[in-house]
Amino acid sequence: MSLQIPHRDKANGVGGATKAVILVGGASRGTRFRPLSLDVPKPLFDVAGHPIIWHCLTAIDKVPSIQEVYLIGYYDESVFRDFIKDAASEFPNLSIKYLREYQALGTAGGLYHFRDAILKGRPERIFVLNSDVCCSFPLNEMLKLFQDKDAEAVILGTRVSEDAASNFGCIVSDAHTRRVLHYVEKPESHISNLINCGVYLFSTEAIFPSIRTAIKRRADRPSRLVSYPSSENLESSFMIDDDDDDENRKNEVIRLEQDILGDMADSKQFFVYETKDFWRQIKTAGSAIPANALYLQKAWQSGSTELATPSANIIPPVYIHPSATVHPTAKLGPNVSIGPRVTIGAGARVKESIVLEDSEIKHDACVLYSIIGWNSRVGAWARVEGTPTPVTSHHTSIIKNGVKVQAITILGKECGVGDEIRVQNCVCLPFKELKRDVANEVIM
């Protein structure tokens, strides 16, 4: 299918301009991404040689009608400063700005808080992307569906297994028209295996009034009954008084998924674009490994010149940073990313792994299904390994001897693995020296 892509409009909002927002979250979120998020915010973590949000920007840059991109979150301004500077030269067509929330406002609350900035220049539509998803971001296809259907909202959806579906927002749609009939966030019973990918396209005239309605509805509820799903009786429910400061703050948290999309399905021209391509959420630190593999495969299929040339010892796709040193007898791949100034010794084997900057993997060491943290050392003949998870799986934990453990082994910043040591299915916090064999542990 060839897409009619309009020419890039001037940034004065003429010709139905579109803007994009990337939701980046904040430091108190992303705790599941520890120990990696202790040293770098999750959106800036390198996957397939680039920060996670760089992959979002690459897709946004392919939509001609977008000139302005806002990153919305509640990290300190300094966090994204260098990234935005680098991105400005890499994406000269895009103006990229960071808007900082004063506290966590929720996925819709942040949009609403910065509505004046977003609506400046009167854009007709906004793309909203969650930064922690890994996919091919078919934004031009979503835009085409939006225009064909004269839609007010388009959501990106994908099919997953029935048992995985209840962990996500589920979409019931009309198979013929693709209209969204019903949306439920993490339903308790099975309603659909078509799930929300966390990528949206909204008409500005539909989304902001919808959020305003949700805020008003919340404010009109003077006190409400709070109960837990397990509660059988009223005694385990209690009244919340909205005069409470804490509760007023909670009132400001408005989430697209829980508070907006369900109502939109009932009242708006809301459609789903179903991607048949890859999709993964990057929630836990271990999920960076499948995301790395998917992005590397995409780069390989599109003929990217960034990837290492295949050879007897390079099984594609492999990304090696130009400043890294890899011994010609070391064997790498598939699905391996080697960061800046990494040294890989003779006869080492690295597969399905991310090796972060300034790390060293000594001769004859073996690294499989693992993330080696910044400035870490893996000794000679050592073995650092995780367990492969099925390609269709949406979580990165496995059950071993009746205990849930991380499938991917993760070494935090500046960890050391001694010579001939074996580390299996472990998460190791920063600055730890491993001098004995360990398996299925969190090393504090």
Image (cartoon, rainbow, N blue to C red):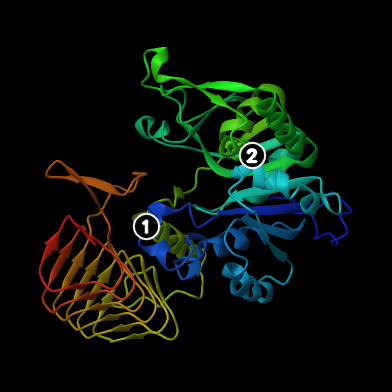
Q: CB of mark 1 within 8 Å of CB of mark 2?
A: no
Q: Of 130 and 325, which appears nearest the observer?
A: 130
Disc 2 element: helix
Who's the residue at 48% across and 51% down the image?
29
Left or right for 225, reference 336: right
- What residue is shown at x 50% (from left), y 57% (from top)? 27
| Res. 417 image quadrant | bottom left
Mark 2: amino acid: Glu
Q: Say which amino acid is labelled 1.
A: Ala
Is the residue marked by circle 2 packed among few (<14), some (14-19), or many (20+) residues within 10 Å? Answer: some
Could you say where residue 320 lies in the image, as x and y percent from the top left? Answer: 40, 78
Residue, disc 2: 252
Q: Which residue is mark 1?
A: 285
How many numbered circles are shown? 2
Please give left or right for residue 260 compared with residue 67 in the image.
left
Q: Is residue 217 above or below residue 308?
A: above
Q: Position of residue 382 (x, y in %)?
A: 15, 74
Residue at x 59% of width, y 43% of height: 106
Query: Residue 96 — which label?
Result: none
